[in-house]
Amino acid sequence: MAQTKTDRKKTVVKKEGQKKSGEKKAKKALTVAEKSVQAAEKAVRKSSKKLREKAAELSKQTEKLAAKQAKAARRLAKETAKASTATNLIELREMAKTQRIVGYSRMNKSALIAALNSSNPA
């Protein structure tokens, strides 16, 4: 079966039509891909913003905790210095007696210092 000229033209037209529909499908797929990429970029920007906000919040919390820790360290140093001014056990026992600490006579020096510091929160 030999093809006639009209049959050949129809075949060429079909191939051109298939090319055009293939190009349309490719353009449509490209458009969908571009939209997906744009949506992904938007999601990344939004996520990055949230992460930056969270980092700033954590930084503020860290600063507050550092200040609180420094304050506690200063208070502890002050209390330790206050108790360590009494250098011997007899003076510590006299201080414990005046502050009415129960069981002071059986305590050693470090226990007396701890008891005096806890009874006087400064």
Image (tube, rainbow, N blue to C red):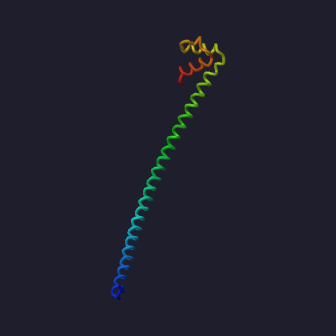
Image x and y of residue 86, in percent: 64, 19
Image quarter hosting the N terminus: bottom left
Q: Where is residue 112 in the image (x, y as percent from the top left)?
A: 59, 17
> Horizontal placement of 66 versus 87: left or right?
left
Q: 2 or 111: nearer the eye?
A: 2
- Residue furthest to the bottom in view is 5
User: Which sits in the foreground, 7 or 40?
Assistant: 7
In the picture as drawn, the residue positioned furthest to the right comes out as: 87
Split into 4 quadrants, where in the image is the C terminus? top right
Q: Up-down: is 120 above or below 71? A: above
Residue at image coords 43%, 58%? 40
Residue at 53% across, 24% down: 121
Quarter of image, res 22: bottom left
Residue 67, quarter of picture: top right
Between residues 97 and 33, which one lies in front from this camera angle?
33
Q: Residue 38, how many percent across, how many down?
A: 42, 62
Residue 119 is situated, as x and y percent measured from the top left of the image, at 53, 20
Left of 23 or right of it: where is 109?
A: right
Q: Is residue 52 left or right of residue 14?
A: right
Kindly identify the residue that appears in the image at 66 percent across and 16 percent down: 88
